[in-house]
Image: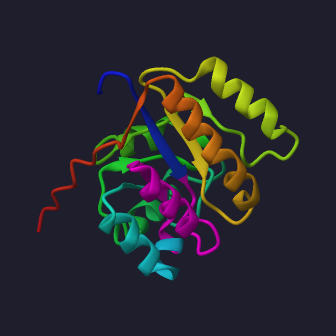
Amino acid sequence: MSENAVYLTFDDGPDPEITPWVLDLLNSEGIKATFFCVGDNVRKYPEIYDRILTEGHAVGNHSMEHLKGIRVSTKEYMRSVNEAAHWIDSDLFRPPYGRISLSQTYRLKRKYRIIMWTWLSYDFDRSVPLETIVANAKDSIGNGDILVLHDNSKTADRLKLLLPKLVEIIRSKKLNFQKIESKKLIIDN
């Protein structure tokens, strides 16, 4: 981990409504981030996924259908993760909802680095006012934090208001934006 760094991550995309806007903002600010992509969205929007990669961001697997691990069998969960791996070339994995069983964790750790978060934005929860999220960011974001936001259509309007403020807060704290590096899987033939 880098000194004075925070790791900006986005879950659930790519999404044609919000991901291009996020990429435009990151580009204009000179920020690299990590996108934990849903395989089905990569399949549907390959041009947006390619743009994420072309612009130098990191990617990670977020399963094929955004499954909640504690609600499905390990076999079904791993099927979803493996199917997403056909679309997403990365050794990074983030479980949707941050929920997986012990057996799923054990299986995933054979191929992936499981990346959770230290700061949850609550951009998806409309009962949490944006002012509360911003105040929390000012009070609690610090060196080494992994921040999670969501680039999906449900959060688009809130993300457009929140992300510029977070960038400003993080810069005011003299923290640097870093992406989480994938070490790329080596696949045996």
Residue furthest to the left in view is 189
User: Is residue 70 among the parts visible in the rendering?
Assistant: no
Does 133 appear above or below 18? above
Q: Which residues are magenta?
A: 11-40
Q: Position of residue 149 (x, y in %)?
A: 60, 46
Q: Quadrant of the N terminus?
A: top left
How is the structure coloured here?
rainbow
Q: Residue at x 79, y 45 (%)?
A: 125
Q: Position of residue 129 (x, y in %)?
A: 84, 38
Does 40 appear above or below 107? below
Query: Foreground: 61 or 170?
Result: 170
User: Is residue 60 among the parts visible in the rendering?
Assistant: yes
Q: Residue at x 58, y 70 (%)?
A: 15
Query: Foreground: 101 or 64?
Result: 64
Q: Quadrant of residue 115?
A: top left
What is the count of numbered marks? 0
Q: Quadrant of the C terminus?
A: bottom left
30 displayed left or right of 110: right
Does 80 appear above or below 96? below
Q: Position of residue 112 (x, y in %)?
A: 32, 46
Q: Position of residue 76 (x, y in %)?
A: 52, 60
Query: Foreground: 130 or 167?
Result: 167
Asked if the magenta segment contains residue 26, the reply would be: yes
Q: Residue at x 42, y 24 (%)?
A: 144
Q: Residue at x 58, y 31 (%)?
A: 169
112 displayed left or right of 151: left
Asked if the magenta segment contains residue 139, the reply would be: no
